Image (cartoon, helix red, strand yellow):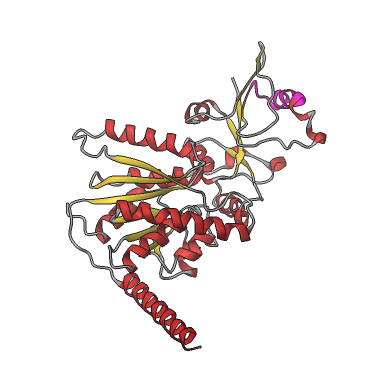
Amino acid sequence: CKCLLLASVTMPDRSARKEAPATLPQIIKSLGYNRLILQIGRGMVVPEPFSTESFTLDVYRYKDSLKEDLQKADLVISHAGAGSCLETLEKGKPIVVVINEKLMNNHQLELAKQLHKEGTLPGLLQSMDLSTLKCYPPGQPEKFSAFLDKVVGLQK
Amino acid sequence: MVCVLVLAAAAGAVAVFLVLRLWIVLHSQDVTPRRSLSLLVVAGSGGHTTEILRLLGSLSSAYSPRHYVIADTDEMSANKINSFELDRADGDPSNMSTTYYIHRIPRSREVRQSWLSTVLTTLHATWLSFPLILRVKPDLVLCNGPGTCVPICVSALLLGILGIKKVIIVYVESICRVETLSLSGKILFHLSDYFIVQWPTLKEKYPKSVYLGRIV
């Protein structure tokens, strides 16, 4: 079972895109996936979930944790939020990001550019070769706690 | 005429006094040895909450009690905080670090809100934050960049300026900020006790910041 997770990517509600939900499963199937999970957040377009022999479409707005779905996914397409990027990359899953340019100083672009520079995010979709991606090294919060304990004078 | 002059002189004197007090508060870094300290954490929505909970996960049980401040319109952060604290309590054999509280204040700014109205909503949030800070009197305020943290940090500074309590303000810039500081970061860079960045480019631009590598 090859699974694609679309997270926090709400579909624009302009009339030109109304036909997109109907054709999306076909497009995803033609790319070799047989399961599509849509996490739609506040999106107003709500596709109808279904399950056939050859294809399953799951749709939901929010879950307390995406850990389970991230585990199942072979590829994740998501907005370029820090939380989404970190959680996906730490699970060792490849992620394609869609930048939300409407946020302060277009900050999602900064992180996406840096991760692409480090080799953890693929480049353009057409030239995407997931096998060349580097593993994302996890952060080290213990350095923060060591620093904080020292500066606040915490006695061991 | 004389009245106006006297009033102006008095206002000027108060302003000078406040600025002097602010300077003293910002430059006092006394490290009193202690066994525990109360912590106030500002949890903005989405990735901000994810990042701050990762930082909290690394802190010992000495950081207790923990007061979380979230925006009144944010439901998801409350759920994430409750799950985090439950997991923490499960993993802690002594079970002494289970005291935590969630407080709500108005959001300083919604996504894409106009800047003029943001000044007003931020002032409103500050007006409501100060009584909370006055009541809690935390030893340490920890935040990582959402607009919600500005009223809280300003209120914490006010406690120091008024001689009530010196609150340590620690600001960790979000990992999203690789080359430029957020607006909250630019405001709080000069007002926090410790300003932590997560990318070397920012450390080069702001040498007075603290760089520990990627910590989330």
Give residue B172's position: percent from left, percent from top: 42, 56
Task: Say which quarter of the image contains residue B191.
Answer: bottom left
- Above or below: residue A97 compared with residue A71: below
Range of the magenta residues? Answer: A22-36
Q: Is residue B30 visible?
A: yes
Q: How many marks overall?
A: 0
**Is residue A66 part of the magenta span, yes or no?**
no
Q: Residue at x 70, y 42 (%)?
A: A127
In the picture, measured across the screen, residue B83 lies left or right of residue A23, that is left
**Of residues B72 and A141, the one drawn nearer to the viewer in this rendering:** B72
Q: Position of residue A97 (x, y in %)?
A: 62, 42
Residue located 37% across and 64% down the image: B157
Q: Is residue A32 above or below residue A91?
A: above
Height in image: A65 above or below B35?
Answer: above
Q: Residue furthest top?
A: A53
Residue in the image at 52% along x and 57% along y? B122
Question: Whole-percent x and y of residue B50?
Answer: 45, 42
Q: Evaluate whether residue B198 shows in this view.
A: no
Residue found at the very far right of the displayed protein: A16
Magenta stretch: helix, strand or loop mostly:
helix
Residue A30 part of the magenta segment: yes
For this view, does B3 lie left or right of residue B82?
right
Between residue A113 and residue B121, name the one nearer to us: B121
What percent of the width, then of the height, locates residue B72?
48, 43
When the figure is inspected, residue B118 is found, relative to residue A27, above or below; the finding is below
At 56% from the left edge and 59% from the top edge, which residue is drawn? B120
Displayed quadrant of residue A121: top right
